[in-house]
Image (cartoon, rainbow, N blue to C red):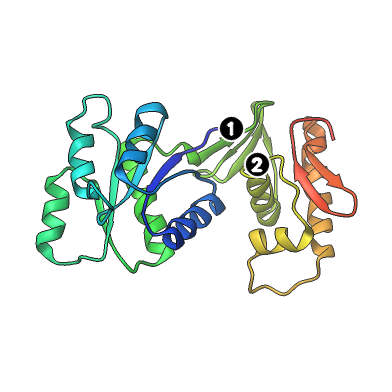
Amino acid sequence: MAETKILVVEDEIAVRELLHATLTKVGYSVCLAGNADEARDIVTCDEIHLLLLDWMLPGMSGLDFAKWLKRDQQLAAMPVILLTARDEENFKVQGLEAGVDDYVTKPFSTRELLARIKAVLRRSGNDAAEIVRTHLGLEIDLSQHRVLAGNQFVPLGPTEFKLLHFFMTHQERVYSRSQILDMVWGRNVYIEERTVDVHIRRLRKALEPHGYQELVQTVRGVGYRFSEQPG
């Protein structure tokens, strides 16, 4: 499965956990660091597609870390979004001069942050999250809003598309019907849990001609999971 991996460097635990939950919910793979030393270890050992970097870090500041990153020949191309409570023009200029790709002022809306992340990834050519695929060949292309089984188009309704995307970006874990409702339909939508069963059946029916229906597995008494391993 192709995933865009984002490293969040933030010393405030609550903010770090919020960013982790927000980014994983929309399909990004997320690594976490609380300071520049931890971030340095991660970026030198793992493939990171974007760095979400807080300015005010203990020890080396986020700005100085960004400068270090841009001086490294192997890491200089990594896109960086700087997070800070400082919104004065001077600070923005410092960040841009350090080579960061964008600048988001705290407090920020989730919608704005995700839009900026997507824009930076698109400009850098690192938006692997546009395409999500299983090892067995089932693929979702988010930019074209279509599903392919091998080279064959799989027609899905909008809810089944969202449901499949959720499952493919949250493989192996078992989710209850109420959790699936919250994650796919949203927390403010009040519908019966058996609605999930209806759409699961429709999704399986659409996948069946291509041999992928068994990937959506029922876990008796609990809910559903998506797995490439036999249930």
Give how far apart the Cα atoms at labels 2 and 1 are: 8 Å
Sequence-first disc among 2 and 1: 1
| Image quarter of the N terminus | top right
Query: Going by the image, does 109 lie left or right of 224?
Result: left
The crowding category of the residue bearing disc 1, from other C-alpha atoms within 10 Å (few below 14, some 14 to 19, many at least 20), is some
- The spot of residue 230 in percent (x, y) is 83, 30
Label for residue 1? 1
The crowding category of the residue bearing disc 2, from other C-alpha atoms within 10 Å (few below 14, some 14 to 19, many at least 20), is many
User: Image height check: is 27 above or below 209?
Assistant: below
* Identity, as a three-letter code, of the amino acid under mark 2: Met
Write the residue at 23% across / 42% down.
65
- The spot of residue 133 in percent (x, y) is 60, 33
Residue contact between numbered discs 2 and 1, judged by CB atoms under 8 Å:
yes
Q: Which of 190 and 29 is in front in this view?
A: 29
Q: Which of 74 and 147 is in front in this view?
A: 74
SS class, disc 1:
loop
Q: Mark 2 points at which residue?
A: 168
User: Image height check: is 47 above or below 195?
Assistant: above
Write the residue at 77% across / 33% down.
212
- The spot of residue 14 in percent (x, y) is 45, 62
* Identity, as a three-letter code, of the amino acid under mark 1: Met
Query: Going by the image, does 86 lie left or right of 167?
Result: left
Query: Going by the image, does 20 lie left or right of 58?
Result: right
Q: Which of 94 and 194 is in front in this view?
A: 94
Write the residue at 56% across / 54% down.
25
- The spot of residue 131 in percent (x, y) is 53, 37
Label for residue 115? none
SS class, disc 2:
helix
